[in-house]
């Protein structure tokens, strides 16, 4: 149990286009989801915290108008990279906290590799 | 500012030996510490966590040690297997609640068959 999926797993797009990444908790309800980005050989950097039915909380330095997060249901959160540019190329990972579960046990998705040409 | 970091960026271990991965933290107010394993091209996987009022916790083939005096955290893997090859991250949760965690820089574990 406690599986998190992401779609797509890999996306290549032209500069200036918008890209939507979906994060789904498949067999549990997630009141809180997190979005991270990870550059090669680096650690995960938290971008934002997403709570179902409310606005996301963004980390300092993360542009909320560029990285649009929607957590419309207890099993789905989406990250839209608006007008993507080559510097946005990265590995985007979501995680989910299971409602009623251990507070530290984030279940991570497999990640989405974004390449902006 | 507060940070979580690792002493060794790469660790090579012979199959069957024990592995010890270290982590230093600076936020003395952190309540929970967590270890994650990340295989290439995948998302991190929760391994084990420990609360600040404990100094040792054991799981299946893994043990986490916490030394609050020197703000040091370690992950011990017994009888290391090729499948243990991955990058290991320590992370801290300041309050233990449903809040964000801060990840350390990661240690790559290479298991030599």
Image (cartoon, coloured by chain):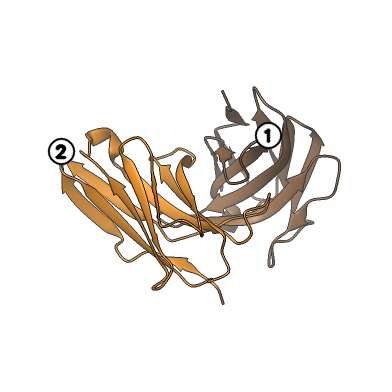
Chain colours: A brown, B orange
A60 left or right of B8?
right
The answer to whether residue B69 is above or below residue B48 is below
A40 left or right of A79?
left
Image position, residue B29 (x, y; %): 58, 69
Name the residue nearer the viewer: A10 or A77: A77
B31 left or right of A72?
left
Image position, residue B44 (x, y; %): 48, 42
Q: Residue at x 42, y 43 (%)?
A: B38
Q: Residue at x 56, y 23 (%)?
A: A1
Q: Residues within 10 Å of mark 1 (few under 14, many from 20)?
A: some
The disc at residue B80 is: none
Residue at mark 1: A22
Name the residue nearer the viewer: B38 or B56: B56
Circle 1 marks a residue in which chain?
Answer: A
Circle 2 marks a residue in which chain?
Answer: B
Image position, residue A76 (x, y; %): 73, 32
Residue at mark 2: B16
Front: mark 1 or 2: 2
């Amino acid at each position: 149990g406690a599986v998190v999926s992401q779609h797509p797993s890999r996306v290549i797009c032209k500069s200036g286009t918008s890209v939507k990444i979906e994060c789904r908790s498949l067999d549990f309800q997630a009141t809180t989801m997190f979005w991270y980005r990870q550059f090669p050989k680096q650690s995960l950097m938290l971008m934002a915290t997403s709570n179902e039915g409310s606005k996301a909380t963004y980390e300092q330095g993360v542009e909320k108008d560029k990285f649009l997060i929607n957590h419309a249901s207890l099993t789905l959160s989406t990250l839209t990279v608006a007008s993507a540019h080559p510097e946005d190329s990265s590995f985007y990972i979501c995680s989910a906290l299971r409602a009623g579960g251990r507070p530290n046990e984030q279940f991570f998705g497999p990640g989405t590799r974004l390449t902006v040409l | 500012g507060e940070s979580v970091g690792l002493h060794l960026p790469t660790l090579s271990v012979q199959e069957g030996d024990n592995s010890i991965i270290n982590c230093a933290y600076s936020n003395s107010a952190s309540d929970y510490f967590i270890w994650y394993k990340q295989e290439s091209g995948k998302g991190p996987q929760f391994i084990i966590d420990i609360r600040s009022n404990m100094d040792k916790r054991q799981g299946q083939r893994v043990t986490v040690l916490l030394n609050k005096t020197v703000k040091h955290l370690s992950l011990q893997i017994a009888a290391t297997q090729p499948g243990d090859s991955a990058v290991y991250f320590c992370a801290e949760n300041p309050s233990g609640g449903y809040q964000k965690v801060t990840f350390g820089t990661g240690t790559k574990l290479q298991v030599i068959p």
